[in-house]
Image: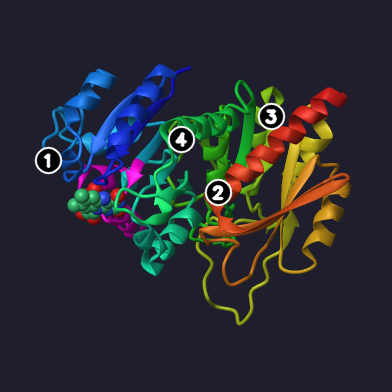
Amino acid sequence: MAKQIIVGVCAGISAYKSAELVRLLCKADYTVHVVMTKSAVKFIAPLTFEALTGHRVYTHLFESQHPSAMDHIELARWAQSILIAPATADFIARLRCGIADDLLSTLCLATTAPIILAPAMNQKMWSNPATQDNIQSIQQRGIRLIGPGIGDQACGDTGPGRMVEPQQILDQLSDADAADNLLTKRRVLITAGPTREPIDPVRYISNHSSGKMGYALAHAAINAGAKVTLVSGPVAISSPQTATTIQVQTAKQMHDAVMGHISCQDIYIGCAAVSDYSPAQVSTTKLKKNADTLTVILNKTQDIVRAVASSHADVFCVGFAAETNDLEHYAREKLRDKQLDMIIANQVGIADGGFSSDNNAASVLWNNGQQTFSLRSKKRLAVDIIKIIAQHYYASKHTT
Ligand SMILES: Cc1cc2nc3c(=O)[nH]c(=O)nc-3n(C[C@H](O)[C@H](O)[C@H](O)COP(=O)(O)O)c2cc1C
């Protein structure tokens, strides 16, 4: 299937290489739209890309030909990936800060598609701490880099900063696409977010889960080609457009939604922070602040991941263990006790990482092995986790 890709072209000498890159992408069955910064047109004419792609080239934020006048939104929705080559030091700085002062930077803010950069600049510009700091920051957010290469530069210097050759960029994209197709035709059910257990009409028991990890997993599974069903507790994140999302509030509703959809799934990932207990009785009227103490009796909720693992042996079942201490010990115990295929252990209650953070570190454990992922963006971690789940899922199919 041809992929829908936006090639962003910034104002650097290597913009001449972008024409060859676009030609190769078109030849490799990508549908390509080119978006240029306003300075990039000083280096190469839009007409070159129009002739190569057969599509108009986008250069301005305020000259939209779309009826909604919002090219940035239309393009952001259309793109399955955005490749910026060359990416200038200036553009990388704007991307890092979330500046949206032209069409390319605005659509990068508006998209959920993966962004890949092929940086190109003078070696001193590349080594400058400002650029290095920007690079580190965007990589933590899950933005991928191809290059830069090391060698002779147009300015006469030698060092890191050359744009990687177009054929190599295409090869690296194809490798990523192979990972993208890992779960084609597979059905994956993911739970995300917290649950809310009502005490009365205005109060509830919940936890700090933001849903970011579960939603990142849903995006990563979709990008890997899976058909995703997302059962989500209350969170402040928009649902992935291509997932079937079922919104729930309580642990019981989450249990029922999962059990109602599990039979046609290949993989289950229980990432939600499901309440372990819920009030035995829910008052129909608001409880008054009369007594000095208030006792709320709690009943244990149903264990969703255990229910899936025990009733659907054919579904590859992945649990999450969020612990404040003895992480791997508790995670391995859970893996055994609940008869899971895999468990993702992550530490909560630390400075960075855990519940509401954009970053996380995790250890992935299975029967006779484990792999640890150091602190990285939840988006990046989700891609890593989906890859390892896919590997073990297919291995389990070969041994049964
Ligand atoms: C001849 C010339 C070549 C340039 N080459 C580069 C380059 O290779 N990489 C880079 O980061 N900036 C380069 N610059 C500087 C950028 O063009 C400048 O920072 C510009 O504002 C970038 O705009 P853009 O990021 O919107 O495309 C060059 C400038 C000139 C005049």
Q: Which mark is residue 169?
A: 4
Q: Residue furthest front?
A: 156
Residue 315 appears in the figure: no
Q: Quadrant of residue 184?
A: top right
Q: Which residues are magenta?
A: 85-107
Inter-mark Cα distance, 1 to 4: 31 Å
Please tell me whether residue 79 is drawn above or below residue 127 in the rendered image: above
Q: Amino acid at mark 4?
A: Ile
Q: Which mark is residue 62?
A: 1
Residue at 36% x, 56% y: name it.
Answer: 157
**Residue 341 position within the rendered picture, expressed as x and y whole percent measured from the top left:** 80, 39
Residue at 40% x, 17% y: name it.
Answer: 27
Is residue 254 found left or right of 115 in the rendered image?
A: right
Residue at 71% x, 25% y: name it.
Answer: 263
The residue carrying mark 3 is 262
Inter-mark Cα distance, 2 to 1: 33 Å
Task: Report crowding for label 4: few under 14, some 14 to 19, many 20 or more residues within 10 A (C-alpha).
Answer: many
**Residue 187 position within the rendered picture, expressed as x and y whole percent measured from the top left:** 63, 26
Q: Nearer the viewer, residue 257 or 218?
A: 218
Q: Nearer the viewer, residue 169 or 372?
A: 169
Q: Does the segment drawn in magenta span residue 376?
A: no
Task: Report crowding for label 3: few under 14, some 14 to 19, many 20 or more residues within 10 A (C-alpha).
Answer: many
Inter-mark Cα distance, 2 to 3: 27 Å
Q: Earlier in the sequence, mark 4 or mark 3?
A: 4
The residue carrying mark 2 is 380
Is residue 122 found left or right of 388 in the rendered image?
A: left
